[in-house]
Image (cartoon, rainbow, N blue to C red):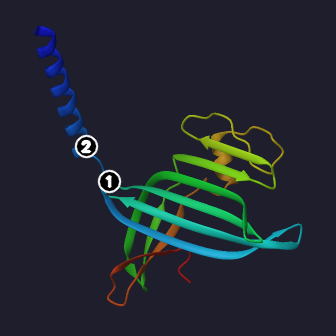
Amino acid sequence: MKKKIALVLALAVAMLSLVGCGSSAAKLSGSYAYGTMSEYSYAGTVMGNQYDVYSINLLDDGSYEMTYTNNVDMGGVIAGTTTMTTYGTYTKGSAADGYIDVVLKAPTRMIYNSYSTLGGFAFSYDTDTDTEFVIPGGDDTAISKADFLNQLGYGQDRTVYIVLDSNNQETCHIELTNE
């Protein structure tokens, strides 16, 4: 009987602690997307199309999660996919000229996945847990987290722009430039 009471009390404490954890979690304050398509060339020859998609979630605690996905299509077949999810903090500006600028601070974490059915490689990294990184298509030399982020273009702050509608309200659309 004492074991049952102790078990019930332990379960109740565990459930209450989980409830407490959930109440302080950051909430989504905005979710935005952007996408492009362009020709994919290799050694100067157009081989297919490349699709780039960005998805950014801004949280009310000043943090962000941005996912970039790149797919290469050759003759209707996906020849490779790269996904980079970055985490960091942001600063949101004021509305001006149909946009709100959002400065994404250089990420503190990246989860990187890339594979190529033609290139014969598959890489997966988490900069919070892995300590050495190799750039696909590089010379297979292991590099640091800072060098990895820099070579992928994520070693510095970047600004994105939330597009406003005709009533100066936010849309779910972002642009990478405000031109």
* Above/below status of 16 relative to 2: below
List the residue tagged with mark 1: 61
State which quadrant residue 48 falls in. bottom right
Dot 1 or dot 2, earlier in sequence: 2
Left or right relative to 32: residue 142:
right
Task: Report the residue at 33% width, 59% height from top.
Answer: 28
Q: Residue at x 46, y 63 (%)?
A: 56
Between residues 94 and 32, which one lies in front from this camera angle?
A: 32
Q: Residues within 10 Å of mark 2 (few under 14, many from 20)?
A: few
For residue 145, side relative to residue 27 (left or right): right
Q: Name the residue rendered at 48%, 70% in the picture.
A: 33
Give the x, y percent position of residue 108: 51, 46
Is 80 left or right of 24, judged from the image as shown? right
Q: Please identify the quadrant where the C terminus is shown.
A: bottom right
Residue 80 coordinates in the image, percent (x, y): 72, 58
Q: Which mark is residue 22?
A: 2
Percent coordinates x, y for residue 134 in the rendering: 73, 42
The total of numbered circles placed on residues is 2
Q: Nearer the viewer, mark 1 or mark 2?
A: 2
Decide if residue 137 is on the left or right side of residue 101.
right
**Secondary structure under the numbered disc 1 in the rendered image:** loop
Cβ–Cβ under 8 Å for marks 1 and 2? no
Residue lying at the far bottom of the rendered structure: 166
Q: Amino acid at mark 2?
A: Gly
Quarter of image, res 5: top left
Q: Quadrant of the N terminus?
A: top left
